[in-house]
Image: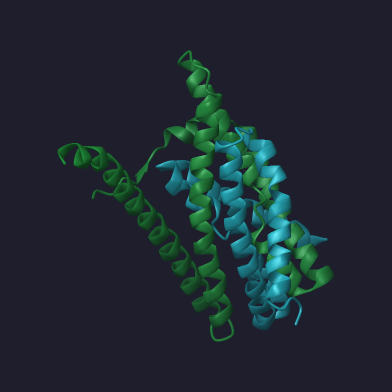
Amino acid sequence: MTEYVVRFLVGGAVVSAFAMLGDLLRPKSFAGLFAAAPSVALATLGIAIHQHGSTYAAKQTTSMMAGAVALAIYSVVVCQLLIRTRMRALPATLLSMLIWLAAAFGLWAVAGGQS
Amino acid sequence: MTTPIRISPSSLREGRWYEYVVRFVLGGAATAFAGLVSSRYGASVGGLFLALPAIFCASATLIEKHEIRRKREAGLAGERRGQEAAALDVAGAALGALGMLAFAAVFSLTVERSVSGAFAAASLACLCASAAAWFARRKMRAAHRAQRNSGPAMSGSR
């Protein structure tokens, strides 16, 4: 339980720091780069190395590559929903989570998955 | 071409305290969730969730809301402008995802040699890849705009 509380606090702090950095920067498209900063990864990988070793963290980041490509696809889809269908930000970002899940697991499976 | 990147502290003043709490909670929850998935289904599945766009819904909604508020204060309906502002941020995130990809690739290749070196090299790769992608896109858009603007003038001179 303590481990998850630590993860929550560290993750919340790192994600908030990157989000505030993004708020400070202009233009908005440049600030958006920080929305995709590997904040969850930075918070998680240190704990993963401490608990399981560097091989475990290497395995996590190999899969993370599929997640990152899925994130690019997700961002393009959200952008199109906002501009072309004039959907509001909350439904567009939530609905596109399905695209992220499908793309991430699809790419992961194509790349060999668990093997 | 001058660098248009600047710091604008005014957007921090626009934020409400609960908006920061929402982002903290979502970020913390995403990190705890990634850990939970890793311990339940293994490092490989858990690794996918290190790229989970968990706070996107909060960030994009806040940007949209701030833009709408700003336009309403100026006596305008700001819905469309709010969507455009959120879309701009998300377009930046698509380029930032390339940085995240570079982070993951460099980290996975270097972590077994040096942990601190892996964090430093991966963070640097992330910053360089996303900034390079952003500048390349900006340059391409500027070239595209110049071509479009010169198009009718050229045909007119013929």
Decide: is A114 above or below B136: below
In the image, taking residue A83 as reference, residue B150 lies left or right, namely left
Decide: is A28 above or below B46: above
Decide: is A49 above or below B81: below
Q: Does residue A45 appear in this view? A: yes
Q: Colour of chain B?
A: green
Q: Does residue A43 appear in this view? A: no
How many labels, in total?
0
Q: How is the image coloured?
A: by chain
Residue A98 image point, x, y percent: 74, 51
Splitting the image into 4 quarters, where does residue A94 fall? top right
Residue B154 image point, x, y percent: 20, 42
Front residue (pair B158, B94): B158
In the image, taking residue B131 as reference, residue B15 lies left or right, namely right
Residue located at (84% from left, 69% from top):
B40
Splitting the image into 4 quarters, where does residue A3 fall? bottom right
Q: Residue furthest front?
A: B158
Residue located at (67% from left, 57% from top):
B52
Front residue (pair B149, B68): B149
Residue located at (54% from left, 57% from top):
A37
Q: Residue furthest top?
A: B75
Residue B144 image point, x, y percent: 33, 48
Front residue (pair A20, A94): A94
Chain painted cyan: A
In the image, taking residue B51 as reference, residue A25 lies left or right, namely left
Quadrant the N terminus of chain A occupies: bottom right
Q: Residue furthest left?
A: B157
Quadrant the C terminus of chain A occupies: bottom right
Decide: is A92 above or below A54: above
